[in-house]
Amino acid sequence: MKHIVKILTLIMTITALWIGLLQTSMIPQSHTWLLPIYFVVSLGCYGLLMVGVGLMNFRTCPQEALLLQKDIVEAKEYLKQRGVDVSTI
């Protein structure tokens, strides 16, 4: 819930700043109307960057892979005891 409040506060702040820029004419009107588009494009680029960084830093867990293989073998044995054919899996 706290994260939602932070996001809404940020959106309201950016909207208030944008409306203020529209009314004060500090920036030319043609540029001010494009600010939301620039913001969305920047946000998309930031999101792609964060996904890329996350993929580059993705760690492999060899010990977890071994535990998963052990669990799979145990599950197959359990299912064989129950009469389920798992030879093709």
Image: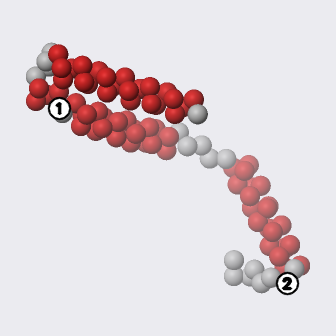
> In the depicted view, which residue is nearer to us: 66 or 54?
54
Which numbered disc, 1 or 2, marks the residue that appears first in the sequence? 1
State the image quarter where residue 10 is shown: top left
Residue 46: percent from left, percent from top: 37, 35
65 left or right of 27 in image? right
State the image quarter where residue 42 is shown: top left
Residue 80: percent from left, percent from top: 84, 79
Residue 15: percent from left, percent from top: 31, 27
Amino acid type for the residue under numbered disc 1: Trp
Q: Quadrant of the N terminus?
A: top right
Q: Residue at x 38, y 29 (%)?
A: 11
> In the depicted view, which residue is nearer to us: 60 or 32?
32
Q: Residue at x 52, y 33 (%)?
A: 4
Colour scheme shown: secondary structure
Determine whether label 1 and label 2 are within 8 Å by CB: no
63 left or right of 1 in image? right
Q: Which residue, given by chain and number where applicable, does mark 2 sit on?
A: 83
Q: Which residue, given by chain and number where applicable, does mark 1 sit on?
A: 33
Query: Is 4 situated above or below 87?
Result: above
